[in-house]
Amino acid sequence: MTPIIRSLGLTFICLALLPAAQAAETFKVTQDLPEIAHVDLGAPGATHGDLMAFEAPFKTEDGKSGVMSGLITTVSIPIENSNDFLDRIGHIVMAFGGVDSLIVSGKSMYPSGQSEMDPNAAQVRAITGGTGRFIGARGQITTTRLDAGHYEHLIELVD
């Protein structure tokens, strides 16, 4: 057996034995209706670079409260008659009080002409960091808009 094949075989065995990332903590928060401010940049109407700034209170499953705030930037406009959704990139901070916060980033789809997500389509974004008890956090957040306009966020943190 050549040294290259032997090395590749050992590498494969080592990778196969590594545990996959496992959820270290999973919890839900329910967000109230957001207060949204629109910033129309560039040409009038929905165009690349338009911003939405928002803020909304939320509650954890154990009754604690916090505030979610963020900037949502339009990055893709649908071609006429092809797709009714805008792609937007969000940068969001979930402040749980004190120094405890999570940082959320990622792309999501919004119905064209709408400020809020489609209630029938869950969106998944990355948790890219945190502070306080969430220092070094990573994972994902799945956001679902409820019919009443509130949002449910499933937070999955990994080791």
Image: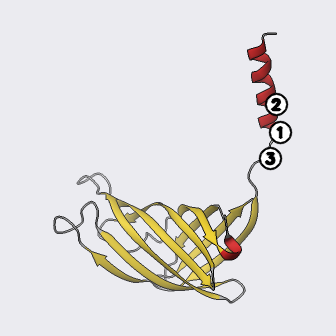
Across and down, in percent, residue 125 comes to 54, 61
Q: Residue at x 49, y 64 (%)?
A: 121
Q: Residue visible at 62% across and 69% down?
A: 130
Instruction: Name the residue carrying label 3.
Output: 19
- Where residue 153 sits in the image (x, y, percent)? 59, 73
Question: Circle 1 is placed at which residue position?
Answer: 17
In the shown orientation, is residue 12 left or right of residue 46? right
Disc 2 designates what residue? 13
Please tell me whether residue 44 is drawn above or below residue 8 in the rendered image: below
Most foreground residue, 15 or 119: 15
Figure quadrant of residue 26 = bottom right
Q: Secondary structure at mark 1?
A: helix
Of the 4 image quadrants, the one containing the C terminus is: bottom right
- In this view, 14 is above or below 155: above
Q: Is residue 85 visible?
A: no
How far separated are the C-alphas under marks 3 and 1?
6 Å
